[in-house]
Amino acid sequence: MKHKYSEDEVFQVSTKKQLEKRVTEEFKLQYGNDPCNVTLTPGRVNIIGEHTDYNSGLAMPAAIDRWICVAISQSNNKSSTIYSLNYKKCITIFPKSTDKIQYSWIQLATTAIHILTTEFGLKEGGNVVVGGNIPIGGGLSSSTAFVIAITYTFCQLFSIQIRDRKLAYLCQKIEHIALGTACGLLDQYSIILSKKNNFMVIDFHDDTIEYIPIYLNEYSWIVVNSQIQRELFDSAYIQRVNECKDGLEILKEKFNIDGFRNIDIDMLLELKSKHEILYKRLLHLVDENDRVKDMIDQLEQGATNKIGPILKKSHESLRLLYQVSCKEIDFIIERSDNFDGWHGGRIIGGGFGGCSIHLLSNHVVDDYHRYITTNYKKKYNIDPDIL
Ligand code: GLA
């Protein structure tokens, strides 16, 4: 599904307070009174551990200071009305409407409300205004943040007690049903279970989470949005999920192993000649899990200077083995490598467009901004967005 949105000033709003103010003002305009509740739900970056969540792997995400803001009050009837500031569109959702919907945000909101109605017996709907400054379809988890924002705000309004992992599972189910995707739990966990000023280390094998305090000292993390929309994303994502499962099945028969985390490089060599694609996918997985462990060690030792090479290797693996990059982001990484003070970077999120994350020395951040904007614009005639 294609994302379509008008360039609203809401994307430029930079603080929580401003966003809340903008959404609350719009609520008063749309419904003539104050909202009962206003919530903020962040987007996320993933430092390392890409396409590992649905393969019982490791990942290291963090929530970011970009949000979806939702204002709500009861509608006093069974239907819900949602006004989106980003899309400049108002929709009404009836409890049992089953029409096929063209836009993914409407499909997500409709599915969330239908599922809440069925599972928790909602008797009434909500009047809602939603707006956010997370780039849409950019790999910063705007869709998941949107689902969580709508679901959580309805739960708050109707005193439905669902939190933490249970909320994450519910929101994952909503996305699966609404979009037919097979996403893992990386985005839901990062958004719901993150802690301020900490990276999370999620182990999807035993469902544990640890937190590592972020000390950046003389370094900055920068996100560059390539502005490339991820059109083939959903089908290619499901294909990757299935390829990993197929590879695991072959290895299970041959080596009598239980799951992804028992796979080692020697076993993979068995796949190489007859199943080259499956070999590549699983090699990425095994190496990427090791890179997460390496990243934990370097961060714990404060060796921030050793992080860059880990990021670069991850990008190469996503480009060549998992094959989820795109030429525009490869160009950004390649050009950045010539820039003094850039230590490493990689594509983030599901891939096929969207954003990349970069580690820079603080003193070069402004120069890098100018350098990458000029180079990217010259090559593709697109202005990147730098966060
Ligand atoms: C998308 C999915 C996540 C995860 C990432 C890749 O963001 O929603 O579950 O698989 O891609 O790491």
Image (cartoon, rainbow, N blue to C red):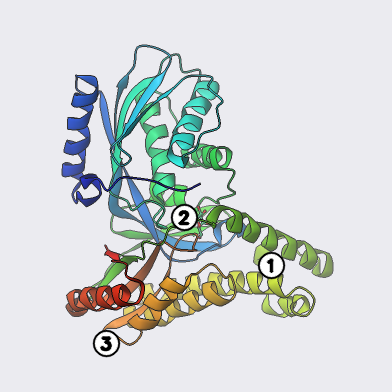
| Percent coordinates x, y for residue 199 in the rendering | 37, 61
State the image quarter where residue 86 is shown. top left
| Residue at image coords 50%, 56% | 231
Q: What's under tag 2, amino acid-wise?
A: Ile
Tell me the residue that label 3 is attached to.
340
| Residue at image coords 53%, 22% | 97
Q: What's under tag 1, amino acid-wise?
A: Asn
The nearer-to-camera label among 2 and 3 is 3
Is 136 on the left or on the right of 108, as rendered? left
| Percent coordinates x, y for residue 181 in the rendering | 58, 47
> Relative to 311, does residue 97 appear above or below in the rendering?
above
Q: Which type of secondary structure does the marked residue at label 2 adopt?
A: strand
Q: Earlier in the sequence, mark 1 or mark 3?
A: 1
**Which numbered tag is attached to residue 209?**
2
State the image quarter where residue 276 is shown. bottom right
| Percent coordinates x, y for residue 267 in the rendering | 74, 76
| Residue at image coords 65%, 58% | 239
Find the distance from the CA under tag 2 to the CA under tag 1.
20 Å
Q: Nearer the viewer, residue 87 or 355?
A: 87
| Percent coordinates x, y for residue 234 in the rendering | 56, 53
**Which numbered tag is attached to residue 262?**
1
> Marks 3 and 1: in contact by CB < 8 Å?
no
